[in-house]
Amino acid sequence: MLRSLRIPLLLACALAACSRPATTDCPPTATATEAAAPTPPPAPEEEPEPLPPAQVEALTVAADDGHELRLWALLPPADASLAKHRPIVLVHGRTWSAVPDFDLRVDDDLSLSLMHALATRGIPAYAIDLRGYGGTPRDASGWAEPDRAAEDLAAALAYVQTAQGEAPDLLGWSLGSLIAQLTVQRHPQAAHSLILYGYPRDLDLRTPIAKPDGEPARQANTEAAARSDFVTEGTISEAAIAAYVSASLAADPVRTDWRAMHQFDALDPEQVEIPTLVIHGIGDPIAKQLWQAKLFTRMTVPDRQWVVIPNADHAAHLEQPERFMRALLGFLEPRPSP
């Protein structure tokens, strides 16, 4: 009982002490002169970053076999990129190409464009269309293959390194995360850091080698396929989903055909030698949390992070763009000061 009265009694004593005359140690109130003093002006706000161009720029990169690859770029003004981050290259997933995935625009609203969010922060943003996607045609075989995609990505990274003067950071989403990892395993100097986003693979499974394929199916893509990544209700507006469906079907009306998927069996987290971020939405049904745990714990590179985005699933960068960007900026290293 005495213990329960101790805190109220101490509080009462403290209040009584501060109610005594000015001879006590209570903090004095402001004098009339002080109250009449002008309020100092607020500190000037930082100048906003100059805005990047309104539209992405279409670039052409030659692969090592001469095939022409489409690389999209959204670059900050030259003066905004001097002391900011390194450039970054984005790799899309299984079904849709770079522009709908990374530069989604809902009428005049750019808040869901990852490339625009990067460029407005002084980060040169590039995004590749792999073979058979968007602005990159299929090759003569008609098929996409993991090893071929990794070499194409290496060519794009080399192009950006030449253009920007340093190795870029590299982000792969979904199937693109597998290609990104395969690329840095084989070309450790091609990227400065690696972001594995929505990693869709159980590292303990192996893919059987399939029999030789015939002609690719070239099936039409569908609205249902474009909507399928948005699972968590209330995370993205219907207008944004409709814009994504429209942009996706316009860029990729035909589904790209893959073969030789056993080539992904070469993925080995211990072979990743550069700083790595593993990131996914908490409700992602494709990037299962157990798979992310295997990926993260089997890495040996000391500079690695694992971030889970709440209230999001496979398309976390569209469902929680601000949280996704904060996590990304928390991982990316700024350029060293000159």
Image (spheres, rainbow, N blue to C red):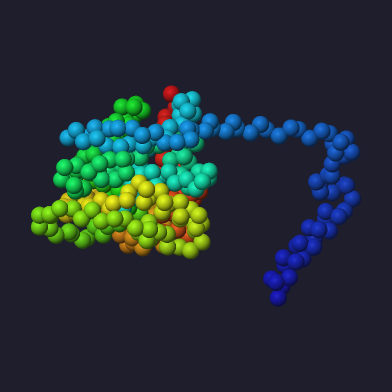
Q: In this view, does 2 lie above or below 118?
A: below
x and y percentages locating residue 122 in the rendered image: 47, 33
Q: In this view, does 196 lie above or below 187?
A: below
x and y percentages locating residue 103 in the rendered image: 43, 43
What residue is at 86 percent from the left and 36 percent from the top? 36
Q: In this view, does 64 lie to the left or right of 231?
A: left
Q: Residue furthest bottom?
A: 1
* Pick the front one: 300 or 70: 70
* Pick the front one: 121 or 26: 121
Q: In this view, does 235 lie to the left or right of 253?
A: right
What residue is at 34 percent from the left and 58 percent from the top? 222
Q: In this view, does 238 lie above or below 273?
A: below
Q: Quadrant of the C terminus?
A: top left
Q: In which quarter of the image is the N terminus?
A: bottom right
x and y percentages locating residue 329 in the rendered image: 45, 42
Dividing the picture into quadrants, the one containing residue 29 is top right
* Pick the front one: 118 or 255: 255
